Image (cartoon, rainbow, N blue to C red):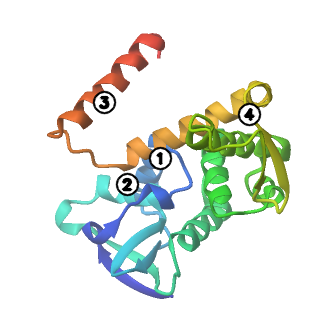
């Protein structure tokens, strides 16, 4: 790794690399206070990948710098790693750094990490150890996710047989049955799977730039807003 000074505008913030569901205003304000007092902070951790500088660790520090520095002084010290193979490797690097010195991950943050690790084909036991989520809950959530993908794509088209065998991330095979049996499994794992899905939806919406001039996109976002207000008026 090499150390360098970068303009804040050069840094790319991609939520796929961020282990948290969202940053904490409380933490940012604490860092701002510490910086104004003269406390020194370590360099931001950055990955140079495909010609872009991706922020891997240091989101709270970056937001604090942006709040206290005049825009003409938006320069930050960074440790830059240049040999990342892909996004998965950058995500894992950020997760490790955060575990070493960052604020504790929330329950929702841990589920976001679990989802990312499952997509990387990590063993269920390793996901449980890394996130602190009980292994059974991880198994249930992953099982529910796989079931829904298969149900949506195959059951209604008639392509899915009554019983199939699906390879799971933990080198184990699970029998997935349709109709009544699937409903039983889904009910037993309902809470974990709903949280799993909501975190995915939230992360996607927060991390995308939507073209509101596109009538279909605008209409869909309005429908989401309306149904949230109707279903959960006390939120």
Disc 1: CA contacts within 10 A as few (<14), some (14-19) or many (>=20)? few
Q: Earlier in the sequence, mark 1 or mark 3?
A: 1
The image position of residue 37, as x and y in percent, is 42, 57
Q: Helix or strand or loop: what does disc 4 sit on? A: loop
Q: Residue at x 45, y 82 (%)?
A: 80
Q: Earlier in the sequence, mark 2 or mark 3?
A: 2
Contact check, label 2 and label 1, Cβ < 8 Å = yes
Front of the two marks 2 and 4: 4
Q: CA distance from mark 2 to mark 4?
A: 48 Å
76 vs 133: above or below: below
Q: CA distance from mark 2 to mark 3?
A: 31 Å
Q: CA distance from mark 4 to mark 1?
A: 40 Å
Q: Earlier in the sequence, mark 4 or mark 1?
A: 1
Pick whichever, 115 or 102, lies toward us.
115
Q: Earlier in the sequence, mark 3 or mark 4?
A: 4
Return the residue at label 1: 23
Give residue 66's quadrant in the image.
bottom left
Return the residue at label 3: 220
The image position of residue 159, as x and y in percent, is 62, 44
User: Would residue 106 be visible to someone looking at this image?
Assistant: no
Q: Which mark is residue 178?
A: 4
Give residue 218's quadrant in the image.
top left
Q: Residue at x 43, y 50 (%)?
A: 33
């Amino acid at each position: 790794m090499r150390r360098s000074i970068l303009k804040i505008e050069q840094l790319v913030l991609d939520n796929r690399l961020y282990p948290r569901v969202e940053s904490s205003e409380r933490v940012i304000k604490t860092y701002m206070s510490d910086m104004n007092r003269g406390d020194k902070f370590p360099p931001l951790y950055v990955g140079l990948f495909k010609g872009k500088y991706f922020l891997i660790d240091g989101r709270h520090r970056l937001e604090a710098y942006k709040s206290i520095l005049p825009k003409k002084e938006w320069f930050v010290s960074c440790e830059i790693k240049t040999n990342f193979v892909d996004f998965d490797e950058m995500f894992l690097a950020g997760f490790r750094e955060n575990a070493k010195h960052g604020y504790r991950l929330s329950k929702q943050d841990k589920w976001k990490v679990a989802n990312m690790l499952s997509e990387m084909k990590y063993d269920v036991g390793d996901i449980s150890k890394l996130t602190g989520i009980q292994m059974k809950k991880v198994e249930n959530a992953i099982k529910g996710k796989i079931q829904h993908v298969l149900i949506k794509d195959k059951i209604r088209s008639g392509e899915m047989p009554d019983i199939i065998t699906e390879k799971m991330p933990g080198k184990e095979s699970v029998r997935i049955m349709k109709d009544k049996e699937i409903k039983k499994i889904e009910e037993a794992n309902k809470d974990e799977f709903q949280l799993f899905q909501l975190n995915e939806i939230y992360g996607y919406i927060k991390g995308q730039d939507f073209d509101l001039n596109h009538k279909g996109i605008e209409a869909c976002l309005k429908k989401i807003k309306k149904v949230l207000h109707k279903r959960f008026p006390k939120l």
